[in-house]
Every structure is written in C-alpha cells, then in structure tokens.
Image (cartoon, rainbow, N blue to C red):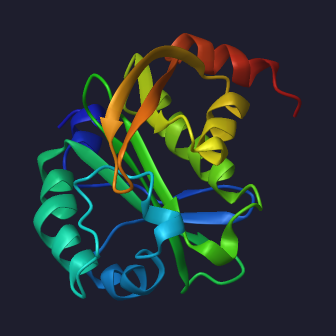
Amino acid sequence: MSFLRYYLGNVIPHLQTPRLLLRPLELSDADQAQILFPHWEIVRYLSTTVPWPYPPDGAHTFYRDVALPAIRRGDEWYWTLRLKTEPDQLIGCISLVKGEKDNRGFWLGLPWHRQGLMTEACEAATSFWFNVLKFPRLRVPKAVANTASRRISEKSGMRLVAREERDYVSRRLPTEIWEITAEEWNARREKAPA
C-alpha cells in the first residue's frame, strides 16, 4: 500500500497546532457537536445541505451517513478541534474534500470565536492537504458577508479567483472563491519567521 493510498483510505492522522489537537472524527463526537453546532451564528453561511432548523439527531445522522462513509471512501478528511488544555472538549470541526471548487470547510463553537483558533486549524489542515495528500490547489468558497472566514483566507495567503452566487442556510448570497496552490503555500511557509 502506497503512503498516499494510506491517507486516501480510512486512516486519518492526528494533527496539532500550538494550541489545538485535531483528532480524526468519530461517531462518538456527535453528542458534543449536537450541542455546539446548531446556532444561527455558526450555520448561516454554510451550504443549504445543512438542514435548518437543525434536527435533534442532525450531527449523529451527518457523521454516520455522510462524513464517515466519505472518509472510508477516501474522498474527505474530518477532524474535531480540541484545546490542548481541554482535550476531552470538542470545540469545532474542520474538513478537507476532494473536488474542483470546494476543498475545505469548518465550524467553531461560539465560546471560542475571535481567538485565532480556526486560523491555526486551517494551517494544519492545509499543510496536510498539500504536503501529505499532494493536491496541487486548494479552493474555498465563502459568502462575501462572511468577513471572519475571509480574514482566515487572507491571512493564509489565499487569493480571490472568482465570484458567483450560492445558496446558504440564510439565503442566496454573493460568493467569493479563494485559492492557493501548493507552490504558493510552500513558498509562503518558507518565508515565515521561525
């Protein structure tokens, strides 16, 4: 089995940042996610594939029927986010998805917003995307109104490559597509101060 095939299958490694542990998603994570996820401030800029109002078993059903099968197929990679200081508390999730237009998604529980935690998680996941999975490009769509997500893309060196309209839980909104290539990512990392 090749190294790449190992990661394209159902084995996802643990990742970490200075403050976070990124643990591969498990069905048992659904109970904590169900408490944190269904808040308007979190879901309003997510795709309409997220049901709203969110059902009482929404996280469990999504993990069981969508996320975990996609992981087993080698099409998607999901991690729960946890503070190193509280490793048993799930605080959010980040995912990577094979495809042409939408390769990364994330959400973070409200108590942990505006602390730079998702920027750290994105750095770890993007590094995995380029330097382990060896994909040539990462693209992420976001509603223009989602300024917090836009700042994460800007901080990570992504550039705006397209505009379109997409449907979100809140409504149809103008959308920007942000992109970075493996070459751009790695050049940026080499220039970063140690």
Determine whether, in the image, residue 107 is placed left or right of residue 30: right
Q: Position of residue 152 (x, y in %)?
A: 66, 40
Q: Which part of the image, by quadrant, shows the C terminus?
A: top right
Determine whether, in the image, residue 11 is placed left or right of residue 180: left
As drawn, 183 above or below 165 = above
> Which quadrant would residue 13 be assigned to in this image?
bottom left
- At x 73%, y 33%, the residue is 155
- At x 63%, y 54%, the residue is 118
> Which quadrant would residue 170 be assigned to in this image?
bottom left
Label count reads: 0
Q: Which part of the image, by quadrant, shows the N terminus?
A: top left
Q: Residue furthest right?
A: 193
Determine whether, in the image, residue 73 is placed left or right of residue 146: left
Q: Is residue 150 visible?
A: yes
Q: Position of residue 128 (x, y in %)?
A: 48, 38
Determine whether, in the image, residue 28 is placed left or right of residue 122: left
Q: Nearer the viewer, residue 173 or 48?
A: 173
Q: Nearer the viewer, residue 165 or 12?
A: 165
Q: Is residue 80 visible?
A: no
As drawn, 58 above or below 6 = below
- At x 47%, y 75%, the residue is 39
Q: Position of residue 101 (x, y in %)?
A: 31, 25
Q: Nearer the viewer, residue 161 or 93?
A: 161
Q: Position of residue 15 (x, y in %)?
A: 53, 55
